[in-house]
Image: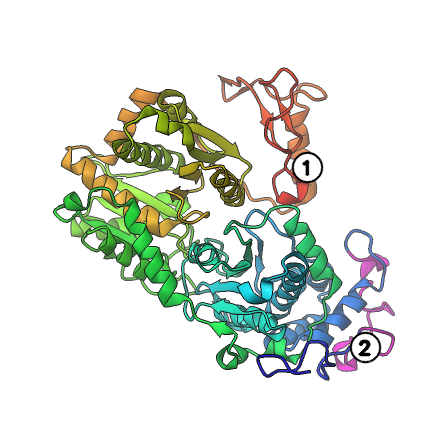
Amino acid sequence: MTSVCGVRSAAEVNPLSHRVGATVRCPAALLPVSMGDEPVGEGPGGEGPGGEGPGLLDEALQRWMTWDQNHWTRVQVESLVASGQFEDLRSRLCSRMSFGTAGLRAPMGAGFNRINDLTVIQSTQGLVSYLSRFMADVSSRGVVVGFDTRAQEESGCSSQRLAKLTAAVMLSRDVPVHLFSTFVPTPFVPYAVRKLGAAAGVMITASHNPKEDNGYKVYWCNGAQITPPHDKEILRSIEEQLEPWSASCWDEGLVERCSLRTDPLTKINSCYMDELASLCFHRDLNSSCPLKFVHSSFHGVGHVFVQQAFQIFGLAPPIPVPEQKDPDPNFPSVRCPNPEEGESVLELSLLLAERENARIVLATDPDADRLAVAEKSDGCGWKVFTGNELAALLGWWMFFNWKERHPDPADTKSIYMLATTVSSKILQAFAHVEGFHFEETLPGFKWIGNRMHELSKTGNTVIFAFEESIGFLCGSMVPEKDGVSSAAVVAEMAAYLHNKSLSLNQQLHNIYQTYGHHVSRTSYVVCNDPSTIQKIFSRIRNFDGEGSYPKSCGGVRIVHVRDVTTGYDSSRADLRSVRPSLPAESGFV
């Protein structure tokens, strides 16, 4: 059998791969001569993590060395075996990744619970198999694939290479692939899924995570990230066929030779920017605005796209932070490429703004789906807005301009604003006063995106949505947080307010005067020990006895508690949360 792409069918036998069985063993040179007569995989105590049998690591190691065709990750495993680092090997080989709030995300490197060539091939095989069962027309609709600029030399991994391997797996099964020819912002993938009518989308990115990480985000045909049951079913499908289908799955060059691969970059970029113009409300003021803006793309993809967005809005281009303008997977100028960290990671942006006499700093994270904003305060340094504060400003701005174009109060009955449940309730206050609808979703923008799709089917429109971790969506052109469009919208809002002799911070306080003060302080603690996490939350849930939550925090009375993991809400008579319970594997406990 010959496929459309001129490669062997996946049903053919691949001489480079072998079934795992009694006759398949790791090369003898990899195994230590002696470990106190312990077979590889037993180690002290004779069991792996969680009490697995003594042969678990042996079997996992055999599979890895049989299937992996990446020289660099094979060398990593060989080195760990040779140096007797069996706990590290167990950690890497004896568990698999699961879909969290942002898809599959893990450090790059060798191992079944890491991001690498083999696990991306396995994940894509599972996705293709599931799509083929779920959608009869996947072979005509195809899948969108995009990538950011991450890379890791020691594992031979880069987002671009992983995207090409993702495409190769799909092409080996004659599934058309819309593979971007260069890096793009994450929101371009869900935008393309909807614009092209694709069956699904994959974005290779770890967003704002440390440089060691990468990820695999999956979008459904509605453009939103996958939610249950799709995520669990795809994982099951992955586990059912872990062996690479054929040598074609490892063939990066297939994307250059196969007629089923197209490059959507020019069309999608043009359509996106054209549609972005619908969020520009005061172009005449923008062209004469004296404000200067500084933009940092945090060594990621954002620079060229934010520049284009400003041009669409008629704004003078923002001044780029030169040290952070160009992509660099090592993120050399920041300890963590996460603009949510605030002033500590915005140092270069603020220094440049001081030199250039710019009043507004905009920073997009490496895949340009999130946005941080800082404003120069007269005599008081810089104000770095929290995600909740920016949401108050953007929510006000989007409704203010919507109402200008829809003066009939009856029209508000069909518009919505959305926020995740861990975010500020400021939009709820807007809705109560102004008469539109507000809804909360579970944490993670995937829930917002899917709710947007549901609302659109009943003739409703979402004009703004956000999550407190600086993720914003103005309008509804893409069911995902979008730092590119949000940057242009914030700049226009600042220009409009400047024309009214107001700063962003002054307008924020005007909003509070109208709708009530909403104050929040969020932070996080990193803990990698599940048992410790469980103890912490068990203590909170049984604070003054079984099933009793704290009554105060820092001297402030707690009015009510909602625990989305257990479905508990003390504000309701039946104590049941109006939001669906959150599965434990989601990462929220």
Q: In this view, does 195 lie to the left or right of 130?
A: left
Question: Where residue 244 is drawn, which disc sits there?
Answer: none
Q: In which quarter of the image is residue 342?
A: top left
Verify whether residue 138 appears in magenta.
no
Q: In this view, does 367 lie to the left or right of 454?
A: left
576 in relation to 223, above or below: above
- 551 and 441: which is toward the camera: 441
Dots 1, 2 in contact, CB < 8 A? no
Give the residue drawn at x 73%, y 66%: 241
Circle 2 residue: 25
Q: Distance between the residues labelled 1 and 2?
A: 39 Å
Image height check: is 196 above or below 413?
below
**Front residue of 521 and 438:** 438
Residue 118: % across, % down:
64, 69
Tell me the residue at 58%/50% (across/down). Answer: 226
- The percent position of residue 115, horizontal first and vertical second, equals 59, 63
**Residue type, mark 1 in image:** Gln
Q: How many numbered marks does the figure carry?
A: 2
Provide residue 110's location: percent of width, then percent of height: 63, 68
Q: In this view, does 481 lie above or below 431?
A: below
**Quarter of the figure with the N terminus:** bottom right
Please state which amino acid type lies under the numbered disc 2: Arg
Can I make out residue 375 in this image? yes
In the rendered image, residue 471, in percent from the top left (x then y), is placed at 42, 44
